[in-house]
Amino acid sequence: MNEKLGARRWTALILIGLFGQFAWTIENMYFNVYLYNTISEDPGYIAAMVGWSAAAATLTTLLMGALSDRVGRRRIFISAGYILWGLSTAAFGYVTKENAARLFPAANAVAAAAVCIVVLDCVMTFFGSTANDAAFNAWVTDVTNEHNRGKAESVLQILPLISMLVIFAAFDGLTKEGKWREFFNIFGVAVTAVGVISFFLVKDHPQLEPRKGGVKELLYGLRPSVMRANPELYLSLAAFAVFSIALQVYYPYIIIYIQQYLKIENYALVLGVVLILASAASVIAGRYIDRVGKLRFAVPATFVMAAGLIGMFFVRGSGAVMVAGTVMMSGHMMLSAALSALIRDWTPEGKVGHFQGIRMIFAVLVPMIIGPNIGAAVIRNSDSTYIELGQVKSVPTPGIYLTAAIILLFCLLPVFFLRRREK
């Protein structure tokens, strides 16, 4: 049935999705800066925070996604999760060396504060993954269908970019002035407020019912029998995994590349133009994903992204980087929207929450382990260096984009097999 989303669901999708991305942007881009600037310059703490947070996100989504299926509720997980997510985000501004010294007088204040940051990041990730990765993503699958998921996904794909633009343009100055407590409080209160609003805005799908299952159901999606029974789903996940690996080859190094290799000082302007133009292209393309079919759309989207990556390999000046970057990011968001919608289409009914954790394994955990290491191997061949966190490191070179383009083309293999099964 071609059921329309309606104004209420669109409002919930955009509001809850956007403020969740505000919290994730702060977690991914600012917590490490706060730790480095105010507590410790030891890169080991940052590495520990990133690693433990990724593990916490995946395990939480597996557990809480399955639990939301079992109790047959999404709204309470979204609302309570966002409220606690906001409070834990605001709490970061109160973790200081001085406070750690008062709480743990017998311990080294720097080490105690750094450990508190790592632990609090895992707590914050638990609430965020419960609310956003598990419950909200499951709810989006519940209330969309194969006729409107492409359009919904195209909107969801631009929300991370909008969050970065808003934070960079309006709030980054607070961090530069050292007003970290105010910075974290603003977004912590905002996310908590959205959690309260979501309780009245979100309605669970009427066909969502409690499901039976024990602890063994947590790994339901990793059973060989389940994989054999749902080949289209796992082919879609495989395509997304390859796409995400290609993305992670260059994405962690993109700002460093622009700053250190291209020597472009106004990188914020360059990235701002790229994000705005790519967001507009994604919204326009979203009107056609459902019309032409997600699989058919995924093929040209792959080539658009690959063309942008190859362009980034060659360009050097600000203007050329804006053009190639726009093509690259437009293809990235269009392909991500098409593949994400495919995954939702093939997710078995009644097991939507269970498969949010499986999606995290394919889309986040595995790519974030493989992709950056491939990028690092390419970068190590360079003789150029830069200083980061007191260490001499190699400068990212254009090779990361060419390598990403080659890897990206392999996502056409599972798409090809999906096309054959569709026919």
Image (cartoon, grey):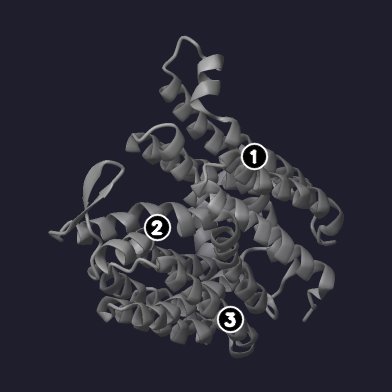
Three-letter amino acid code of the residue under disc 2: Pro
Looking at the rendered structure, the secondary structure element under dot 3 is helix
Three-letter amino acid code of the residue under disc 1: Ala
Disc number placed over residue 322 in the picture, else none: none
Q: Is residue 354 visible?
A: no
Closest to the observer, 316 or 337: 316
**In the displayed structure, would residue 51 be above or below residue 280?**
above
Closest to the observer, 412 or 228: 412
The residue at the far bottom in this view is 292
Q: Residue at x 40, y 54 (%)?
A: 368
The reply, left or right, for residue 221 in relation to residue 15 is: left
Q: Residue at x 61, y 85 (%)?
A: 284
Q: Residue at x 58, y 85 (%)?
A: 285
Q: Is residue 120 visible?
A: yes
Tell which circle, 2 or 1, labels the residue nearer the N-terminal end.
Answer: 1
**In the displayed structure, would residue 388 be above or below residue 384?**
above
**In the displayed structure, would residue 195 be above or below residue 114?**
below
Three-letter amino acid code of the residue under disc 3: Ala
| Residue at numbered disc 1 | 90
| Residue at numbered disc 2 | 367
| Residue at numbered disc 3 | 280
Residue 215 image offset from top left, x and y in percent = 61, 38
Residue 47 image offset from top left, x and y in percent = 37, 40
Tell which circle, 2 or 3, labels the residue nearer the N-terminal end.
Answer: 3
Residue 288 image offset from top left, x and y in percent = 61, 88
Tell which circle, 1 or 3, labels the residue nearer the N-terminal end.
Answer: 1
Looking at the rendered structure, the secondary structure element under dot 1 is helix
The reply, left or right, for residue 328 in relation to residue 373 is: right
The residue at the far front in this view is 177
